[in-house]
Image (spheres, grey):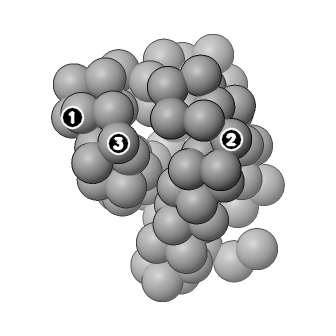
Amino acid sequence: MALEEAVKILVEAMTPYIGGHMAHAAVQSHCEKLKLSGTPSAAQLDDLVTRLGVGLNIFVGKEKSSKVVAEMKSALGAKGVER
């Protein structure tokens, strides 16, 4: 899966909880920190989702963060990212 598609999926999953602008900024920031580009591996995307989940703990709490992480993993899996 292309990084752009993964970013779109992750932003859509996080938007209801933290808003579109913050979701996009968080995903982009972590992609840059992880030096992701092109077609990242499933392991790289899993690391990205894990890092996003840690940040979400601050904004929505651990319980909701766990739910959002599960939603992100499910959405990526539905688009063909193997775990």
Helix, strand or loop at disc 3? Answer: helix
The answer to whether residue 5 is above or below residue 20 is below
Q: Give the residue drawn at x 68%, y 41%.
A: 62
Task: Identify which amino acid the numbered label 2 is placed on.
Answer: Lys
Question: In the image, what residue occupies the spot 45% across and 31% down?
Answer: 27
The location of residue 46, given as percent across then percent down, is 71, 53
In the image, residue 54 above or below residue 71: above
Q: Which of 46/39 is in front?
A: 46
Real-space CA distance between mark 3 and mark 1, rounded to the nearest whole angstrom: 9 Å
Instruction: Tell whether label 3 touches label 2 (CB within 8 Å).
Output: no
Which residue was labeled with disc 2?
62
| Residue 44: image location, x then y, percent | 72, 46
Q: CA distance from mark 2 to mark 1?
A: 20 Å
Q: CA distance from mark 2 to mark 3?
A: 13 Å
The quarter of the image holding the C terminus is bottom right
Left or right: residue 38 versus residue 7 is: right
The secondary element bearing badge 2 is classed as helix
* Amino acid type, label 3: Tyr
Seen in the picture, residue 12 relative to 34 is either above or below; the reply is: below
Closest to the camera, between mark 3 and mark 1, is 3
Q: Residue furthest left?
A: 20
Residue designated by label 3: 17
Which disc, if any, is residue 82?
none
Counting residues from the start of the chain, the first of labels 2 and 1 encountered is 1
The crowd level at tag 2 (other Cα within 10 Å; few <14, some 14-19, many 20+) is: some
Q: Which mark is residue 20?
A: 1
Residue 56 placed where, x, y %? Answer: 56, 32
Rendered location of residue 32, percent (x, y): 54, 18
